[in-house]
Amino acid sequence: MMFAVAMTFIDQTIVSIAAPDIVRELGLSASGMQWVVNAYLLALAAFFALGGRLADLYGPRRLVVIGTMVFVISSVLCGCVPKGDGAQAWLIGFRAVQGLGAALLFPAALAVVVAVFPPERRGRALALFFGLSGALTAIGPLLGGWLTAGWTWRAVFWVNVPVAVVALALTAWAHIADRRRPGTLDVPGAALMAIGMGLSVLGFQQAWSWGWDSAATWGCIAGGLVILLVFVRYEQRVRNPLIDLRVFRDRAFTMDAAVLFFAMLAFVPLFFFASVYAQVSLSASPNQAALFLLYFFAGFAIASQWGGRILDKQGARPALKLGTVVGAVGFALWAGKLTDLSMHDQWPYAALAGAGIGFILAPASTDAVNRAIGPSYGEVTGITQTVRNYAASVGLAVFGTILTHVTNTNVTNTLEARGLPSNVADDVAHGVTESITGNGDSSTPTGSGAVATATRNAMNAIRMDFAEANQWVFYGMAIALGVGFLCALRHPGGRAVTSQDADQEERTPGRTPTAPQP
């Protein structure tokens, strides 16, 4: 199962490093390139709960196989995108199908793992499972840089083919039992969730192009949130809901989900913004940009296993408090170092930020899964992973809008200081912002005119402008983790008592079953 989900997490970040080559060959717009990254995350969030419910209804093994097939076929088609006017729509569309495949695959795979391990061993097993997922998210840029530099950017999609073949072979060899639960599929609920999430993220994503004063921007954001509210009300009345909202009566589960949301606002978007920052402000190659992210991964990997041990011994609350504090401090210190334009000077703070996220993800995810209602691990996993991926989509959209706005303002001021008229400086700054915030292209402008000359002479200053704009993003990530700390304080603590624990107590002779503790 770990092998099966490997593809889904690598693809969250692998495309970021290959973005400049994709844009140059296919001629994508900057917003189009961001949608290539975000379409996957958004589809993953919108359909994750559906995948969890399908795993319950039809059996996890079947969903693992179907999800793997959908994922790998769409991966091949992403790599085969033709050049021309339809390239952008083709790539974004099949990236969304990839997200659908991942949404079918991952909750089913996790349901298998949960069913195999008894409660007393599940904490460490799931810590390894979720720790691997985070590690593979971090490895994505490394693999993407190596494949892009050594072969072609299309290989970042084709690499999923051999992984899928091995995953399917291992799934067949493992002889996984398909345990089904009775019920029906909540199609209206799935539609409401997908539309609500899609509209809200669309508004955030397009705010740079449409403007924050645009009715379309706020219409999408408000409309999406209203539809999500309608979804919640609908789920409370339907007999077989897509998401059993009763689980949110458990305050610990609600706080787990809240901490995950604020942590994921920073986690996945970081890989996109840090890789583009490295290529633009630090003039790094794709491979060097990928290595830059290794500092973050080192802290994450160590803290993930440590967080799993804290969960097993003390419950989730201490790990969540520690992780949010360490992460907020790490991102804040890292933001302050971005304008030094030195990769070497930033590594301690990148590692500290990674450690903060590492302390959070496995304990929060595992504690939430252990608080499942009855045997419905597929549903509960669907909820937590929906929260995680929706937060990643929102984070990418919101921080992307902040980055482009601040970059445009900074570059405009820089060009005006070099003698360009205000209206000309704004037009040039808009083009520069589009070129560097969407795909990391920092190529020097050519030509002998006054505008080209002024822009060319300002390139070093523009790299600093971009670094200063990224500071806003990283400080925003620190604030998100600070809010996560406030949520962690409201976590009641203690260890979850699962349905398996209760069953074991009932089977123990002479022992009176105890009620689940907070």
Image (cartoon, rainbow, N blue to C red):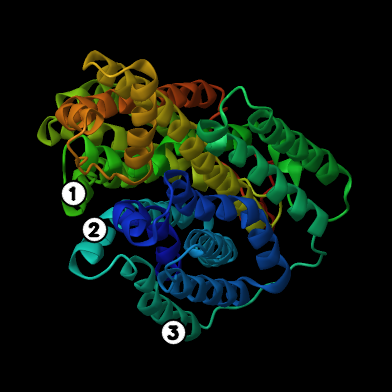
The answer to whether 474 appears left or right of 503 in the picture is: left
Residue 179: give x, y in percent of width and height: 67, 73
Task: Mark 2 or mark 1: name the one nearer the start of the chain.
Answer: 2
Residue 347: give x, y in percent of width and height: 17, 35
The answer to whether 122 appears left or right of 273 in the picture is: right
Using the image, tell me which numbered label, if any, was put on residue 169.
Answer: 3
Q: Which amino acid does label 3 sit on?
A: Ala
Quadrant of the snapshot with the C terminus: top right
Q: Tell me the distance, in whole angstroms, between the alpha carbons under discs 3 and 2.
A: 28 Å
The residue positioned 71% from the left and 54% from the top of the image is: 374
Badge 2 marks a residue whose secondary structure is: helix
Q: Nearer the viewer, mark 3 or mark 1?
A: 1
Using the image, tell me which numbered label, if any, was put on residue 291.
Answer: 1
Q: Which amino acid does label 1 sit on?
A: Leu
The residue positioned 39% from the left and 56% from the top of the image is: 27
Badge 1 marks a residue whose secondary structure is: helix
- Callout 1 crowding tier (Cα within 10 Å): few <14, some 14–19, many ≥20: many
- Where is 120 relative to 346, above or below? below
The reply to whether the C-beta atoms of the residues labelled 3 and 2 are less than 8 Å apart is: no
The reply to whether the C-beta atoms of the residues labelled 2 and 1 are less than 8 Å apart is: yes
Given residues 22 and 42, the one toward you in this image is 22
Name the residue that disc number 2 marks: 145
- Where is 455 relative to 245, above or below? above
Residue 238: give x, y in percent of width and height: 88, 50
Q: Which residue lies furthest to the front in this view?
A: 449
The image quadrant that residue 202 belongs to is top right
The reply to whether the C-beta atoms of the residues labelled 3 and 1 are less than 8 Å apart is: no
- Callout 2 crowding tier (Cα within 10 Å): few <14, some 14–19, many ≥20: many
The residue positioned 88% from the left and 53% from the top of the image is: 239
Q: Which of marks 3 and 2 is in front?
A: 2
The answer to whether 490 appears left or right of 464 in the picture is: right
Task: Mark 3 or mark 2: name the one nearer the start of the chain.
Answer: 2
